[in-house]
Every structure is written in C-alpha cells, then in structure tokens.
Image (cartoon, grey):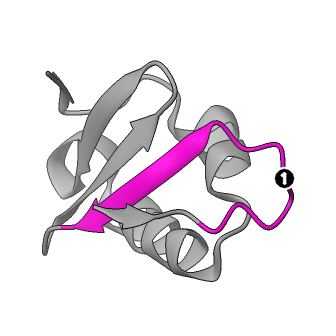
Amino acid sequence: MKRYKNLSGNSGVIAYRFNGDSITVQFEDGVYQYTYASTGRSRIERMKVLAAAGTGLSTFIARYVRDAYAAKLP
C-alpha cells in the first residue's frame, strides 16, 4: 500500500492502494475495500483522485460513502 500524504494533518487514512475497479484504504481502525459495485464508479474514481492528492479522502468517505465498502479486510 502507498502511504497517504495527509496534507491536512488530521486524516484517519494511513495508506491506500488502487486495484482497477476498486480502492483499498487503510484507516487507523482497519482496512476497507471499496469497489465500483459497492460504492459506485464515480465515487471510486473521485476517491482515487483524492488519495493521490493526499487530501480530502477521509472527509469524502465520511460524507458520501460511509459504510458502502465491499469488505473489511484482516
């Protein structure tokens, strides 16, 4: 996984990985996989942009995605 830049300094996101039609996000409390099927293509693509930018990902997930993850990974 790639370390999240966390430019704001207060994100719960630690790292992320792009997987074609999904994004895997590591938070302080666990690792979650979000897919086109569970979250929607446009939201996944927006999450990828925010992850690469290093800012806004946690806020976007909290506001628009919430519990629409495909899996919580070990």
Which residue lies at the image location 51% right of the left edge and 47% below the top edge? 14
Judging by the rendered image, the residue that carries numbered circle 1 is 9
> Residue 12 lies in magenta, yes or no?
yes
Which residue lies at the image location 36% right of the left edge and 68% below the top edge? 2
Q: Is residue 46 left or right of residue 22?
A: right
Density class for disc 1 (Cα within 10 Å; few <14, some 14-19, many ≥20) is: few
Q: Is residue 25 left or right of residue 71?
A: right
Q: Position of residue 74 (x, y in %)?
A: 14, 21
Q: How many marks?
A: 1
> Residue 2 lies in magenta, yes or no?
no
The quarter of the picture where residue 15 lies is bottom left
Q: Image height check: is 22 above or below 35? A: below
Q: Which amino acid does the dot numbered 1 rest on? A: Gly
Q: Image height check: is 63 above or below 53? A: above
Quadrant where the N terminus lies?
bottom left
Q: Position of residue 68 (x, y in %)?
A: 36, 30
Q: Which residues are magenta?
A: 5-18
- Secondary structure, mark 1, is loop
Decide which of 17, 69 is in the foreground and name it.
17
